[in-house]
Image (spheres, coloured by chain):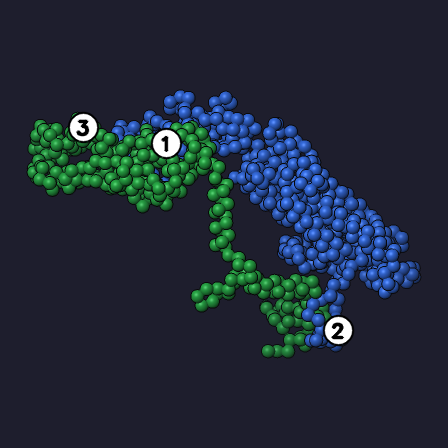
Amino acid sequence: MTDHHSDIDSVSGKSTTGHEWDGIKELNTPLPRWWVICFYLTIVWSIGYWVVYPAWPLVSSNTTGMFGYSSRADVAVELANLEKIRGDKMTALGAASLADIEKDPALLALARAKGKTVFGDNCAPCHGSGAAGAKGYPNLNDDDWLWGGTLDQIMQTIQFGARSGHAKTHEGQMLAFGKDGVLKGDEIVTVANYVRSLSGLSTRQGFDKAKGEKIFAENCVACHGDGGKGNQEMGAPNLTDKIWLYGSDEASLIETISQGRAGVMPAWEGRLDPATIKAMAVYVHSLGGGK
Amino acid sequence: MNKTVNPNELKPVDDNGPLYAARKKVYPQSVSGTFRRIKWGLMAICLGVYYFLPFVRWNRGLGAPSQAVLIDLPNSRFYFFFIELWPQEVYYFTGLLIVAAVALFLMNSVGGRIWCGYLCPQTVWTDLFYAVERLIEGDRRERMKKDKSSDPLKLERISEIVLKHSIWLMIAWWTGGAWVLYFNDAPTLVKELVTFQGPMIAYIWIGILTATTYILAGYMREQVCTYMCPWPRIQAALTDEWALNVTYRYDRGEKRTSVKKAAELRALGEQVGDCVDCYQCVAVCPTGIDIRNGPQMECIQCGLCIDACDNVMAKIGRPKRLIGYDNDINIHRRQEGKAPIYRIVRARTIVYSAIIAAIGGFMVYTLATRSLLDVNVLHDRNPVAVKLSDGSIRNAYTVRLLNKSGYDRAIAIDVEGPVNPTMHVVGVDSVTPDRPIIVIPRDSTSELRLLVTAPAENNPEKSIPVRFHVMDIGLGVAASATDNFVAP
């Protein structure tokens, strides 16, 4: 290293740092005292930080600081405060009737916000984050309801589930007509084509509609009703509309008729508090398909 | 004019010396003259506006704040006389900042650091604090003597010091106090503050601004301009050779000599400079520099040295403005015997003015024509489209209606896009079946869930544009927003 202190700028008479860029040399200009003091104070301050706050990583944990500060504990306090703030509103939600919640813009907004969050945590695994459903899991945005789409019916389904084992759960299942030997192979194909014809879908060539109608009347009408309009008491879907939970193609229908269907929805009573279930019912209803 | 140093006289810097440069305290002398008067005037205007603007009232009707300038943080509103800005309109502040920056450039290209010398808060408050100091402790010489005096502190001196700091703190406290008044109803807040009922945050901010004003204007002074402010560095890159700066006209001033000697030499018909080396320009300088050394970074160009020099020139019977607003080009022209030329209008100033006019004009135009009713639409992403049991397709949208006016509005929503659509707003009973009508309270927003259904026979095959029109059914003021209607 050169002895830069002897390098003196001839114009200003000041020494240079010895650094040079494109012929321009940097003057060695000391900082003002207050500036230097401030700089040292920041260093002292940072040492204080190491001591007071959790800072240094150790092998399996970290230094905990002096006052037990932890951002995790802070979050817990914040969440508790939030519950406190929301307490009154959630009480109001719990006290109001379902219909009244929908009429009150403030309660509706709260129920939708709360419902959306809880839906994401509990319902999204089956119904999807936007409640669009999947094969075997109903789309809650549309207007086709297995167990009814009024506010009360939606709430009942959430509370008790379907085939959930709860005492008040929705019961009723699609029998396995093929597996149980009730219908033979060609009968199943015929009735499957008949069901397709109910909602205006194309049928297989040479399909005997009269025979299909006869099989349907003997085996299916009990649950799906005359003309296949369905029955929400038993969770029997409407076979004349454009929405198919397990698919409308012939192969899917044959599988449904042969094997039967009995999707399970768990009961949420006991797992979620009543006000939250109410909020969820309003949220699902407001998705657009509610009656 | 740079000092030239004889290399033989240079001594190496003492390696064992202090790491820092000790501050040389500046004792600016009082001065009178044109620029001092301009500075007093501008100081009065700036401080007057700052301290009293929050008390100006503006009637906005019942329920709305009646303060002319108010930053209403809890409700996210900014009020400026007849203008009310919402959070999504903060781009007006962006525009204002751009205009302010270019205005700074323009000032700089016309008259140098006009901002620094006359308008910068640091200058204004430091100037005020100096005035207080002078009033109590006397002018330059007295203050220097008092500071140097090693006498034990006399009661008189102590009372002077106490009085000075008390007045400084009062000014600083009022500065912090005025600041918080911009964020709440001023008369109410003043009443709360004096009865100790004010919000804690207000006291905290008053404390912060009292401390910063007291420290920056009372102690830091020119150190802020020299060490803390980036503008001296930036402005050096923005200036050009035509910009008028506070300049020592060395063509007229050199060689410096005493008044007596100058008179003798002039009598003999010799050329002598007008500068009599009286150091008045140095004595009045608030940053403690010698303007005769040429343009310097520390110079805030307040013009006080011009006044000081003019006073001296008047006394010795020489023409004024040995120091004045000028540039090096004109000094050289005068040295060559040519008349000086001043170019205020040149490419740079035209461009800056044009930018200010364009952005300012655009802002005024958009402000004048902005709608007080607005609508934002967000399409549901999951699911994007829903097929209903009768085969029709439904899309869901989150619609946010903004009523920026001071009265409640009944708003009708119409949709344009799919053929014969039906519309349903969740939670809203529509007056007419296909045309939901919603009442939005004044100065607020409403978020709605809006479902649009295209009947099966008119199902669009692909995504088509959809337009939502919202209309005030009483006044007919309309706004619209565009989104898409998607087929599954």
Mark 2 packing: few (<14 Cα in 10 Å), some, or many (20+)?
few
Q: Position of residue B258 (x, y in %)?
A: 88, 62
Q: Residue at x 60, y 70 (%)?
A: A20
- Colour assigned to chain B in the rendering is blue
Q: Would residue B108 be visible to someone looking at this image? A: no
Q: Nearer the viewer, mark 1 or mark 2?
A: 1
What residue sits right under mark 3 in the picture? A225
Chain bearing mark 2: B
Q: Residue at x 30, y 34 (%)?
A: A142
Q: Quadrant of the C terminus of chain A?
A: top left
Please report whichever mark, 1 or 2, sits nearer to the chain's N-terminal start: 2
Disc 3 residue type (three-letter): Gly
What residue sits right under mark 2 in the picture? B6
**Nearest to the observer: residue B441 or residue B414:** B441
**Nearest to the observer: residue A39 or residue A265:** A265
Task: Examine the rendered structure and indicate whether residue B285 appears above or below residue B198.
Answer: below
Relative horizontal placement of residue A91, taking residue A211 as reference (left or right): right
Looking at the rendered structure, the secondary structure element under dot 2 is loop
For the residues marked 3 and 2, what is the alpha-carbon distance in whole angstroms? 114 Å
Looking at the rendered structure, the secondary structure element under dot 1 is strand
Q: Position of residue B150 (x, y in %)?
A: 85, 65
Q: Nearer the viewer, mark 3 or mark 2?
A: 3
State which quadrant residue B92 falls in. Answer: top right
For the residues marked 1 and 3, what is the alpha-carbon distance in whole angstroms? 31 Å
Q: Which chain is green?
A: A
For the residues marked 1 and 2, what is the alpha-carbon distance in whole angstroms? 87 Å
Chain bearing mark 3: A
